[in-house]
Amino acid sequence: DYTLANIEELLQQADATPGDICQATVFFQKAAYRELYRSVADDRGWPHIPALHVRADVCRPDLLFEIDALALRPGTLDVSSPDLARSR
């Protein structure tokens, strides 16, 4: 719950929501925590997001899972941007 609340706060600062997450990697301390994550996400009203689920060490032992996510709000990516064109 702590992890999802932190992500929601970061998203809110960018005027985004969990529904704007377009890709994520969810790292689980134990494979069994995957179902717990889904239950907590459902309870918080998170949509099912495109995510890779990985069993791996997480940054803090008190966290059962952590998430690395990318969110894009509709209409905020300008593909004609010169900066984006240079990076291709």
Image (tube, rainbow, N blue to C red):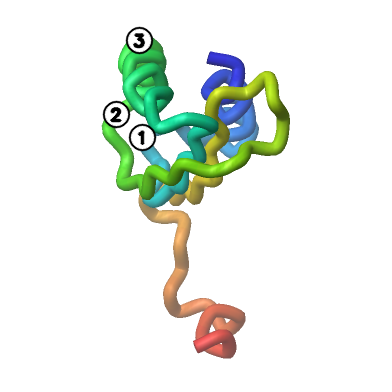
In this picture, is 44 found above or below 70?
A: above
52 and 46: which is toward the camera:
52
Tell me the kind of residue under disc 2.
Answer: Pro
Q: Residue furthest top?
A: 43
Q: Decide: is 61 above or below 26.
A: above
Q: Secondary structure at mark 1?
A: helix
Residue under the point 54% across and 79% down = 84
Badge 2 vs badge 1, beta-carbon distance below 8 Å: yes
State the image coordinates of residue 79 (x, y, percent, origin top left): 43, 74
Q: Earlier in the sequence, mark 3 or mark 1?
A: 1
**Is 57 placed left or right of 88 in the picture?**
right
- Secondary element at image label 2: loop
Label disc, if present, on residue 47 of the rendered structure: 2
> Does 29 sit left or right of 54 as displayed?
right
Residue, x 38% and y 43% (percent of image)? 53
Q: Amino acid at mark 3?
A: Asp
| Residue under numbered circle 3 | 43
In-front residue for pair 36/88: 36
Q: CA distance from mark 2 to mark 3?
A: 10 Å
Give the number of the mark in front: 3 or 1. Answer: 3
Q: Which residue is mark 1?
A: 19
Mark 1 residue type: Gly
Q: Position of residue 3 (x, y in %)?
A: 58, 24
C-alpha span from label 3 to label 1: 14 Å
